[in-house]
């Protein structure tokens, strides 16, 4: 006997994926709690992660690291420019 396929709306799917990601509970447990197939929820989670990676969204840790790296790059560029100017002045003094 075949079962009728259940259609879940986008809001339900997104909510289920959010539960998995925010609570860090296993997909199987969340699927049992919601009364849906484990494989179905696994597909939703996998698809959501792939979409997020494809869009280039950064996690909170990546964003913090990016901000720190940009600040470091700015500081290193400033130091480089100061060294360039001091070399120019040193060469001018040496050639007088």
Image (cartoon, rainbow, N blue to C red):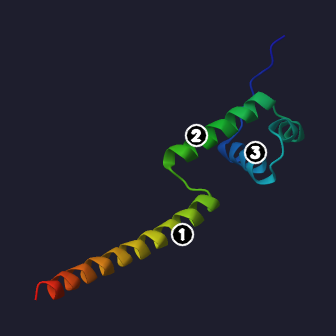
Element under disc 3: helix
> Which residue lies at the image location 25% right of the left edge and 79% below the top edge?
87
The residue nearer to you, when weighing 25 against 34, is: 25
* Left or right side of 13 for 2: right
Disc 1 vs disc 2: Cβ atoms closer than 8 Å?
no
Disc 3 vs disc 1: Cβ atoms closer than 8 Å?
no
The image shows residue 67, relative to residue 89, as above or below, that is above
Looking at the picture, how far across and down is residue 65, in whole percent? Answer: 57, 63
Q: Quadrant of the N terminus?
A: top right
Q: Quadrant of the C terminus?
A: bottom left
> Which residue lies at the image location 34% right of the left edge and 74% below the top edge?
80
Q: Quadrant of residue 30?
A: top right
Q: How many marks?
A: 3
Tell which residue pokes out farthest to the left in this image. Answer: 96
Element under disc 2: helix
Please name the residue that numbered disc 2 is placed on. Answer: 50
Disc 2 vs disc 3: which is toward the camera?
2
> Which residue lies at the image location 31% right of the left edge and 78% below the top edge?
83
């Amino acid at each position: 006997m075949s079962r009728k396929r259940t259609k879940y709306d986008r809001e339900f799917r997104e909510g289920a994926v959010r539960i998995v990601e925010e609570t860090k509970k296993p997909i199987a447990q969340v699927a049992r709690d919601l009364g849906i197939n484990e494989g179905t929820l696994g597909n939703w989670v996998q698809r959501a992660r792939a979409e997020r990676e494809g869009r280039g969204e950064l996690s909170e840790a990546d964003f913090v690291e990016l901000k720190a790296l940009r600040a470091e790059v700015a500081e290193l560029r400033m130091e480089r420019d100061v060294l360039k100017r001091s070399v120019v002045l040193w060469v001018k003094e040496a050639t007088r």
